[in-house]
């Protein structure tokens, strides 16, 4: 029997690279898209170099691969052609197939305004930053084309093996001998990349659509999280300073922490909290 086919966008990304390996291990034949960075060299993973804003090429890839599952993780922090445009085009191409695949889209906790935190799937989104607005537009485009799609909203994604992009600024500052700030009044629900990837594979295997929040069980501020993650990755945190989001020039959501009780109650995958994973890395330096 031929393995189930998965089309995975963002196969060279922080989440996608882990997901490609895990999905292949779970028995999928994975087509993993990339543009400039390589995808993992693993049996069962086929790299596909493509510019996802070339919508004709994207539609052709969907037809050629004829996937039974599509997982759309590719994103940009600024390019709406990737975040909103590509998402809508990909979902529409999948909907046009004779047998539309199960579709899973990874969104963000930043679709919320951050006024109160611990948002559940029942709460109405209201993004205050452009990235959040683009991701919400993508959610709606996907759901309109494929009503049975799964929309997964992670919080900050991290790993203990490599530096996530959201800490890159801190490392650059340290290398230049400069101090840097983590906001002590901004709260999130960080999720370990392995847990998130396992949750996605489970959702795909069970074909569970709808909205799913995917935050770790702990609500922590960016100061606590940033300093602990730096230490966990082997970097000093002595150059870090406590900052205030409220005092910054840019408008940022203060508390986008997530309530992921739905996932905890219905899935086998556990989304560990940051305190559980990083709490042992207390200390100065």
Image: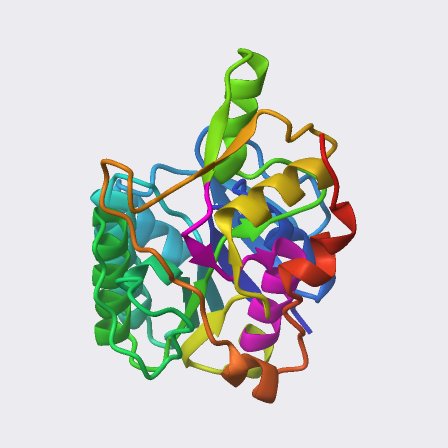
Residue in view at x 56 percent, y 24 percent: 171
Q: Quadrant of residue 265?
A: bottom right
User: Where does residue 54 sit, x and y in percent of width and height?
Assistant: 26, 40
- Residue 26 versus residue 44 in the image, above or below: below
156 sits left or right of 230 in the view: left
Camera-side residue of 173 and 36: 173
Q: Which residues are magenta?
A: 183-203
Camera-side residue of 104 and 279: 279
207 sits left or right of 120 in the view: right
- Residue 115 appears in the rendering: yes
Residue in view at x 34 percent, y 56 percent: 254
Camera-side residue of 154 and 5: 154
User: Where does residue 222 sit, x and y in percent of width and height?
Assistant: 49, 48
3 sits left or right of 212 in the view: right
User: Where does residue 150 sit, x and y in percent of width and height?
Assistant: 41, 74
Q: Is residue 111 magenta?
A: no
248 sits left or right of 45 in the view: left
- Residue 4 appears in the rendering: no
Q: Quadrant of residue 127?
A: bottom left
Residue in view at x 30 percent, y 79 percent: 123
Q: Quadrant of residue 267?
A: bottom right
User: Where does residue 183 sit, x and y in percent of width and height?
Assistant: 43, 43
């Amino acid at each position: 029997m031929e393995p189930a086919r998965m089309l995975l966008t963002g196969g060279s990304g922080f989440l996608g690279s882990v997901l490609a390996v895990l999905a292949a291990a779970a028995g999928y034949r994975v087509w993993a898209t990339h543009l400039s960075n390589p995808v993992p060299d693993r049996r069962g993973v086929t790299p596909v170099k493509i510019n996802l804003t070339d919508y004709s090429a994207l539609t052709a890839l969907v037809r050629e691969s004829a996937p039974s599952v599509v997982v759309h993780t590719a994103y940009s922090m600024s390019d709406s052609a990737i975040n909103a445009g590509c998402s809508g085009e990909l979902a529409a191409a999948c909907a046009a197939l004779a047998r539309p695949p199960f579709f899973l889209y990874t969104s963000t906790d930043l679709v919320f305004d951050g006024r109160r935190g611990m948002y559940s799937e029942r709460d109405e989104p209201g993004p205050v930053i452009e990235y959040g607005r683009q991701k919400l537009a993508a959610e709606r485009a996907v759901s309109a084309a494929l009503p049975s799609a799964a929309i997964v909203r992670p919080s900050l994604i991290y790993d203990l093996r490599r530096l996530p992009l959201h800490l890159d600024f801190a490392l650059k500052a340290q290398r230049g001998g400069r101090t840097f700030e983590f906001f002590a009044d901004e709260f999130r629900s960080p999720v370990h990349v392995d847990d998130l990837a396992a949750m996605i594979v489970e959702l795909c295997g069970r074909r569970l659509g709808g909205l799913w929040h995917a935050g770790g069980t702990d609500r922590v501020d960016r100061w606590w999280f940033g300093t602990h993650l730096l230490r966990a990755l082997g970097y000093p945190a002595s150059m870090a300073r406590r900052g205030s989001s409220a005092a910054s020039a840019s408008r940022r959501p203060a508390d986008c922490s997530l309530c992921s009780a739905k996932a905890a109650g219905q899935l086998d995958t556990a989304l560990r909290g940051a305190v559980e994973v990083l709490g042992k890395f207390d200390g100065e330096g």
